[in-house]
Image (cartoon, rainbow, N blue to C red):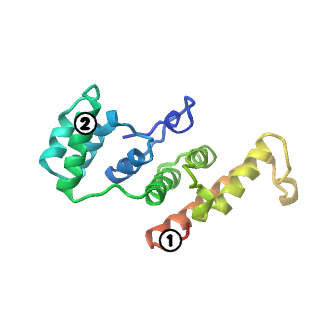
C-alpha cells in the first residue's frame, strides 16, 4: 500500500514511491493513518509477503465497503492466528520513520519533500526528533531558509544557492543512510 501524504497532514499531496510492507501497514493502522476500510488491503499485503491464516485470507477477500465491525473481527482473528500483536505507539511510529527514510535513501524520493512526510508524522507525543534525526532536520531547515530567501548558508561555503541545496540534500541522504544502518543494528530503537 502506498500511503498518501494527505492521510498524514490533511492536505492533498504526492504519494511516496515505496510500497509499505505488511508490518509497516500494521503500524500505520495502529497509529490511525490507515482505517478499518484499509484492512482488506493490509491482509493482501500480508498474504503477498507469505503470511497465511484462514482469517487473513477471508479478510483479504473482503471489500472496503464491508461493515467495519466485520473487518475488525476478521482482523483480530487473523492477528491471533498469526500470533501477532500490534506494536506499541513508539515502535509503530519508528516503523513509519523507517518507511519514509527508506523511500528517500532507496527509492530516490526528494530528500527535502520526503522529510516533510517525516515531520508531518508527529503522533501524540512522538516526534521525529525523539529518534536521533536532529542532523537531518537541521539540513531540512537550512534548505527551507535558502528556498525562502531567509538565512544565507551558501555564501560562506562559496556555493550558489542551488549548489548548497543540492549539497544539503545529499548530506540528508548520507545522514539517513547512517540512521537506517543504526536502526537495523538496533542502536536507536531504545533512544526515545
Q: Secondary structure at mark 1?
A: loop
Residues under labels 1 and 2: Cα distance?
A: 33 Å
Residue at 65 percent of width and 58 percent of height: 136
**Front one among 179 and 27:** 27
Pointer 1 residue: 190
User: x and y percent of residue 105 in the render?
Assistant: 52, 55
Q: Secondary structure at mark 2?
A: helix
Residue at 49 percent of width and 35 percent of height: 7
Whether residue 45 appears in this view of the structure is yes
156 with respect to 73 (left or right): right
- What's the mark number on residue 147? none
Pointer 2 residue: 71
Quadrant, the N terminus: top left
Nearer the camera: disc 1 or disc 2:
2
Bin the neighbour count of mark 1 within 10 Å (Cα to Cα): few under 14, some 14-19, many 20 and up: few
Bin the neighbour count of mark 2 within 10 Å (Cα to Cα): few under 14, some 14-19, many 20 and up: many
181 with respect to 85 (left or right): right
Q: Is residue 173 above or below residue 64?
A: below
Residue at 40 percent of width and 51 percent of height: 27
Determine which quarter of the picture holds residue 82: bottom left
Amino acid at each position: 500500500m502506498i500511503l498518501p501524504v494527505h492521510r498524514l497532514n490533511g492536505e492533498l499531496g504526492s504519494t511516496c514511491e515505496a510500497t509499505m510492507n505488511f508490518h509497516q501497514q500494521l503500524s500505520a493502522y495502529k497509529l490511525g493513518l490507515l482505517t478499518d476500510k484499509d484492512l482488506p488491503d493490509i491482509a493482501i499485503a500480508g498474504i503477498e509477503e507469505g503470511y497465511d491464516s484462514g482469517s487473513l485470507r477471508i479478510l483479504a477477500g473482503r471489500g472496503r465497503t464491508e461493515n467495519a465491525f466485520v473487518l475488525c473481527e476478521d482482523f483480530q482473528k487473523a492477528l491471533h492466528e498469526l500470533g501477532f500483536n500490534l506494536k506499541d505507539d513508539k515502535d509503530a511510529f519508528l516503523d513509519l520513520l523507517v518507511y519514509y527514510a527508506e523511500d528517500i535513501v532507496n527509492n530516490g524520493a526528494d530528500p527535502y519533500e520526503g522529510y516533510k512526510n517525516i515531520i508531518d508524522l508527529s503522533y501524540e507525543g512522538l516526534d521525529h526528533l525523539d529518534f536521533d534525526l536532529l542532523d537531518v532536520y537541521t539540513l531540512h531547515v537550512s534548505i527551507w531558509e535558502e528556498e525562502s530567501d531567509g538565512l544565507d548558508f551558501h555564501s560562506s561555503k562559496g556555493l550558489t544557492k542551488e549548489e548548497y541545496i543540492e549539497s544539503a540534500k545529499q548530506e540528508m541522504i548520507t545522514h539517513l543512510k547512517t540512521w537506517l544502518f543504526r536502526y537495523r543494528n538496533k542502536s536507536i530503537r531504545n533512544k526515545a
